[in-house]
Image (cartoon, helix red, strand yellow):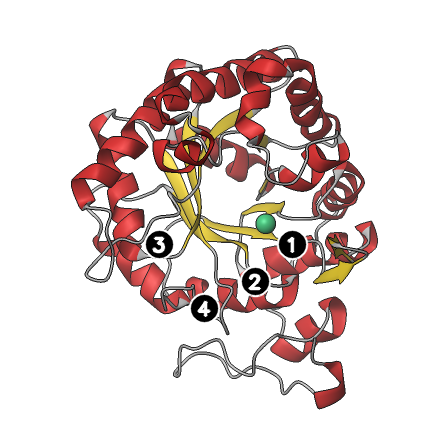
Amino acid sequence: MSDIIDEIIAKKGFLLADGATGTNLFNLGLEAGDPPEFWNVDEPDKIRSLYQGSVDSGCDLFLTNSFGGNASRLKLHNSEDRAYELSLAASKLGREVADKSGREILVAGSIGPTGDIMGDAGWLSHNEAVQMFQVTAQGLMDGGADLIWVETISSPEEFIAASEAIENINAPWVGTMSFDTAGRTMMGVTSHDMSNLVKKMKYAPIGFGANCGVGASDLLRTVLGLNENADRPIIAKGNAGIPKYVDGHIHYDGTPEVMAEYAVLARACGATIIGGCCGTMPAHLKAMRRALDNYEVRDVPSLSEISKALGPFSSETDGTGDGPKPARVRRGQRR
Ligand SMILES: [Zn+2]
């Protein structure tokens, strides 16, 4: 399996992953607060069209609609016993869409955080978390996923619990964390911490990196940090621009042109698995595909080149201390 990812990267130099799940589903009529995973069973055509959007945009891989498909998150909707069923349905639909595409497309079974706190300060035990993740991962693999994609994680404890669950079912996996707090994850993990963690894991991911967070600039600064010390493919899955609150909902201001530039810069920063996160729609993905297909080798961009192209950083440093010094953000540009 790690061969399949390697094969695609070897052919083209990169792999294009998908864009937003949430933003696309809201456009299809999902109401805020509703669990998107129910649609795997109740609105399968809408989920097919979500996946088809990635396929038609030229993605090599897309994630299943199962981000919140674990018992802890589903419990909020009195459906903690549906984790397996909803995850299975998510990847069955994914397999179906990928297989009829006529080209090789990987289905990555998405696993998001439990929403519970782990570690010394938390209440979710390691074993409980492993069990929970394992049910979801099993459903995803039974439904035909090619690999598991753990995403938006903020604590090392949760990342490790997920890896153990996936090890128990012998599946390949990749994992991303969300660095949304001045360059660190909510639980304080820096890019350097993550690279070191991955290196010493017992059942390590075949690729790792960053998703979501704040804007695309911050995410690339994290990728630079990860790349200083990486021994496997790096993932960049940044938001389409910077989130802004407009008329009661979150709007992402990144145009397809900006995301094309982001994709090229991500490649130059060392990422080989490149996609978008919140706000990234098919139009963005198509522009990214075109830009990456025409990629010409270039120097690693400086932080000021990144902020000039994609907008200012949300914090002055990425929290690593000995990491690359970020460009100074002018006061008036802070958001
Ligand atoms: Zn996101």
How far apart marks 1 and 3 lie (CA) works out to: 25 Å
**Quarter location, residue 122:** bottom left
Q: Residues within 10 Å of mark 4 (few under 14, many from 20)?
A: many
> 21 or 69: which is nearer to us?
69
Graded by Cα atoms within 10 Å as few (under 14), some (14 to 19) or many (20 or more), the crowding at tag 2 reads: many
Q: Which mark is residue 43?
A: none
Which residue in the protein does label 4 denote?
Answer: 225
Q: Mark 1 falls on what kind of element?
A: loop
**Residue 150 at x, y percent in the picture:** 41, 41
Depth order, front residue of 335/287: 335
N-term-proximal mark, 1 vs 3: 3
The alpha-carbon separation of the residues under discs 3 and 4 comes to 13 Å
- If you read the primary sequence from the N terminus, does the residue marked by circle 4 or circle 2 appear first? 2
Does residue 171 appear in this view?
A: yes
Q: CA distance from mark 1 to mark 2?
A: 8 Å
Q: Amino acid at mark 1?
A: Asn
Tell which circle, 2 or 3, labels the residue nearer the N-terminal end: 2
Quick check: 113 left or right of 292?
A: left
Residue holding disc 3: 231
Residue at the image position 68 percent from the left and 35 percent from the top: 31
Which amino acid type is marked by label 3? Asp
The amino acid type of the residue labelled 4 equals Gly
Give the mark nearest the N terminus, 4 or 1: 4
Q: Position of residue 314 (x, y in %)?
A: 61, 75
